[in-house]
Image (spheres, helix red, strand yellow):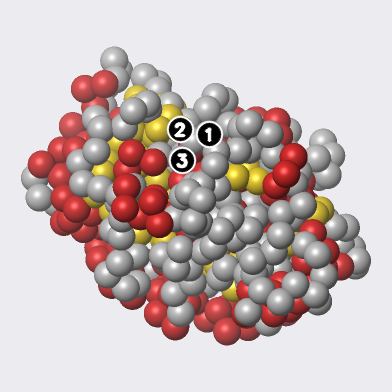
Amino acid sequence: MSALASLRVSALFLGALSWACSPAADAPGQGSAAVPDGQAGAAGPAAPAGPASTPRPNGASPSGLKVVVVGIDGATWVVMDPLLAGGELPTFASLIARGTRAPLESQKPILSPCVWTTIATGKHREDHGITRFRSTHSTADKPKLMATTDRTAPAIWNMVTSFGVGVGVIGWWVTWPAEAVEGFVVSDRVAYSRWSSWTDGKQDRRLTHPEALIEKLKDLVVDPVKAPPADEIFALADFTEHEQKQILDADHPIPFHAPSVLKFGFCEQRTYEKIGLELFSRSQPSLSLLFLVAVDPISHTYWHLYRPSEFQGHVDPDEARRIGRIVPSIYKHNDTYLAELLPKFDANTVVLVVSDHGFKASGKLPGLETRVDYKAVGIERAEELDDPVNVGQSGIHELDGIFLAAGGPILKGVTLKRKASVLDVTPTVLALLGLPIGKDMPGRVLDELIDPAFLAQHPVTYIDAYEERCKPTAFDEPVEFDDSGRTELLNSLGYTDVGGGK
Ligand SMILES: [Zn+2]
């Protein structure tokens, strides 16, 4: 079957992976994806028995269903509900109308790389190894962003690959260096992100899998310095000419400095939006993951203008009237984008929309600063500014994010048995794909969401751990954690700014 054939293909890349889904985990020479489970007899009482008529060869009976996971950093029902009530999020409204919505509980400390990796592994951060922003390869004078090589557990793209099930991953946190999968990975180092400037996140190798894919995508990378999409950014609010100039002049991102964070966050998201449209128009893998970042930086820096009544100090009413709508605007932008993207997938596709946390007021208004500290983002660095700028985090992370599921066997308007957790996403996606859940995953399949007829046909199955199938493999050539490998490609991608204070 094609499953084993594709496992053989991925074996070619073994030496270059951090997590290789090795066919060696299965008996060699098996003629089908129905690989015997060496552990089945010793699985113990925790392994639920499927119907006697259902063959359960290692749980490998893909359902044939397609699943799209859209990750929206920092999305909250607190912003969405008034917009939904006003009919301003028609795409989300139609997903809700034919599916189920709920809060999604995050984990503290609420740090995006940790939580997004928990969503993608079904493991606590202590078990998947992404416990902060900075890589374990970091030193005080050379901060490095977390990388795939820091992860100590397989991600869902490794898991599905181990069954020969196709996957496409775009922009997800901690996906560089891109791992070999049954499909493609467009890593989180393809876009020109604010984190690239703050830490040493810029790399020129293994930006994508297959590696040559980057050549086809580089024209889609939105360069915030050389070619910012000014009209799109200015449409988000009513900026004065002076404010527009501040946005255009921002040549590197400064933590919690609204004009620069807006510009870099928006361009990062537009990069992955364009790549998503391009790649998912061409093919729709069984599992597609797409990450959209801009709600988070915009909510951090503009919350006081969106909800001035939540702050004690003085918020300029004119500024709030003109710019406050930028928070709703980015949600409406996402709604419009999904209206364009989702029809690329067939009508039976399951769409999941998740966020890693919500947002609330910090209570602190931005203040004029001449020196900015990168400590706020976990980096030992400070930058002196030529001109004082308003810097501040008026919006901060809140524990409840969003969960929305619709399509295929997803039931309408279900009340969940227990509050959904970021730990539940991977088990639920695996169950929808007909693949086994790791018994070492602390989350659960949100099975009350799924049509019992589907579950009868595709009962939830278990394996002890995906580590049985997906082995960590050292990179055969060093992936450089310094800047020496920069090339023309990097420059052409816009990776020319070394960032503040270096
Ligand atoms: Zn954030």
Which of discs 1 and 2 lies nearer the camera? The answer is 1
Identify the image quadrant of the N terminus: bottom right
Number of residues whose C-alpha sits closer than 10 Å to that of mark 3, classed few (under 14), some (14–19) or many (20 or more)? many
**Image vertical order of residue 289 relative to residue 99, above or below:** below
Question: Residue 443's mark?
Answer: 1
Q: Residue at x 30, y 49 (%)?
A: 451
- Residue that mark 3 sits on: 445
Q: Earlier in the sequence, mark 3 or mark 2?
A: 2
The image shows residue 325 at horizontal and vertical percentages of 22, 44
Residue positioned most to the left = 86
**Image vertical order of residue 110 relative to residue 346, above or below:** above
Number of residues whose C-alpha sits closer than 10 Å to that of mark 2, classed few (under 14), some (14–19) or many (20 or more)? many
Number of residues whose C-alpha sits closer than 10 Å to that of mark 1, classed few (under 14), some (14–19) or many (20 or more)? many
Q: Is residue 224 visible?
A: no
Give 376 or 162, whichever is nearer the viewer: 162
Identify the amino acid type marked 1.
Answer: Gly
Residue 438, quarter of picture: top right
